[in-house]
Image: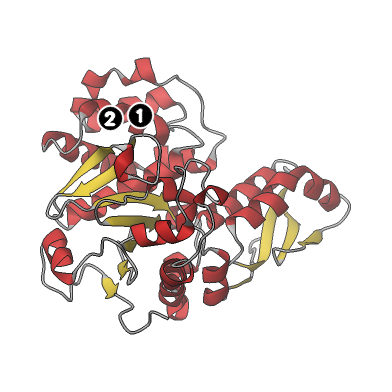
Amino acid sequence: MAITTTHQLIGDLVAQAPFLKGLSLREHIPDYDFSEDMHLYSFANDAPTRRLVARVLAKLAKEDRINKRDVIPVISKLMSVRGFYGTYCQMMAYSWLQTNDVDFNAEVWLGSENLINDNDVALDGRFNATGAIFEVKALGIQNKLKSDFVEKLEQFFPAHIILVDGRDDASFSDIADKALSKTAEIAAELKRKDSLIIEGLGWRVRKEKLGKKLYTTTSEFDPYLFAEQNKLFAYRHCSQFVITRPFVLTCVYSSDFGTSFLTTNFGGLRDVALRALARRTFIEFSENAEDVHKYDHKAGSGFTMGDACHALSALLFIEAKSFDASLYLNPNAANPLALSDIEKIFGAPLPSEMFHLDDFRHDNY
């Protein structure tokens, strides 16, 4: 039987991880039907992935790597439409770390004096071997937004399927502004014709009648354009950057939300794009004097983009299911991660089979 409500999902997770029973999750999380949300519904009815998340939480709790009271808001976000994707990526990052026997604690509170923030904040984890802090963010959100856009548009055309051809390197804000926020307008135009072009995205949107045996779409991708359009990705979260010790922003991308260049790595384009994105993040903003509030309204006062750049010690990219990973070190970090620190954190001499490593030592200009 399909799982369609939060309380049904709680029941399944409790069966997999009995320690959750003592948290009285049904009292903290309202019961509602999420069957209309494609991504949360897909997760809830993917038994292997549900079990993986339950195992991650159970192992953290058993080893006292997370305060049990912090598990409640984590699961609450996992079961919300707004918080699901980011929390799912957080669980996948924890799973990668557990699989590689990395010593870490989860949901670590830091005081505002340690942060680009005026408030105390709970960050996703601490590498216990060195004290470095990490935070997990969902990368490839553009692909999820495209999927959300198609799902919303198909509601206007029950006897059709919606197909999107074109570029796969548009920015988050462009997709939100030019597609998602204008779904009703686009639907009205598609009622008059079978296809249209969304200017500024390079998308051709088509409606096809259901019943065909084969539907195809075409995509284009430029890794350097992707890096340019997403160069602010890290800085939109800079209120969580740590200024008193090494800080690693961990970026997770997943094939569970549609295939893209990130999960297929066709012709090595993913590797080129991620390195280009890391290089822009570390180098382009190193001397930038803009106020961080321009990009993250939660950031504390008195910090520049250059300050935020120097607070970022590394970017770690992880594919959620294959666990392909790349670690890029910031050559301009105020609190850098030395190669010896990385060996301590990951418990293995370099080079490591866990991830591709690049420190931009000879590419910092």
Looking at the rendered structure, the secondary structure element under dot 1 is helix
Q: Which of the 4 image quadrants contains residue 29?
A: top left
Badge 2 vs badge 1, beta-carbon distance below 8 Å: yes
On the picture, is 132 further left or further right than 282? left
Q: Amino acid at mark 1?
A: Pro
What x and y, as percent, mark residue 133? 25, 50
Question: Can residue 97 be seen?
Answer: yes
Looking at the rendered structure, the secondary structure element under dot 2 is helix
Q: Which of the 4 image quadrants contains residue 114?
A: top left
Crowding near the residue tagged with mark 2, few <14, some 14–19, many ≥20 C-alpha atoms within 10 Å:
few
> Can you name the residue that lies furthest to the right here?
192
Quadrant of the image containing the C terminus:
bottom left
Q: Amino acid at mark 2?
A: Asp
Question: Can residue 318 be seen?
Answer: no
Give the residue pinned by disc 1: 73
68 above or below 287? above
* Residue at image coords 69%, 63%: 201
* Residue at image coords 37%, 82%: 363
On the picture, is 242 further left or further right than 117? left
What x and y, as percent, mark residue 178? 72, 54
Residue closest to the eye, 185 or 224:
224
238 above or below 226? above
Residue closest to the eye, 40 or 291:
291
Give the residue pinned by disc 2: 70
145 above or below 267? above
Q: Which mark is residue 314?
A: none
206 above or below 1? below
Q: Which of the 4 image quadrants contains residue 22?
A: top left
What x and y, as percent, mark residue 188? 84, 46
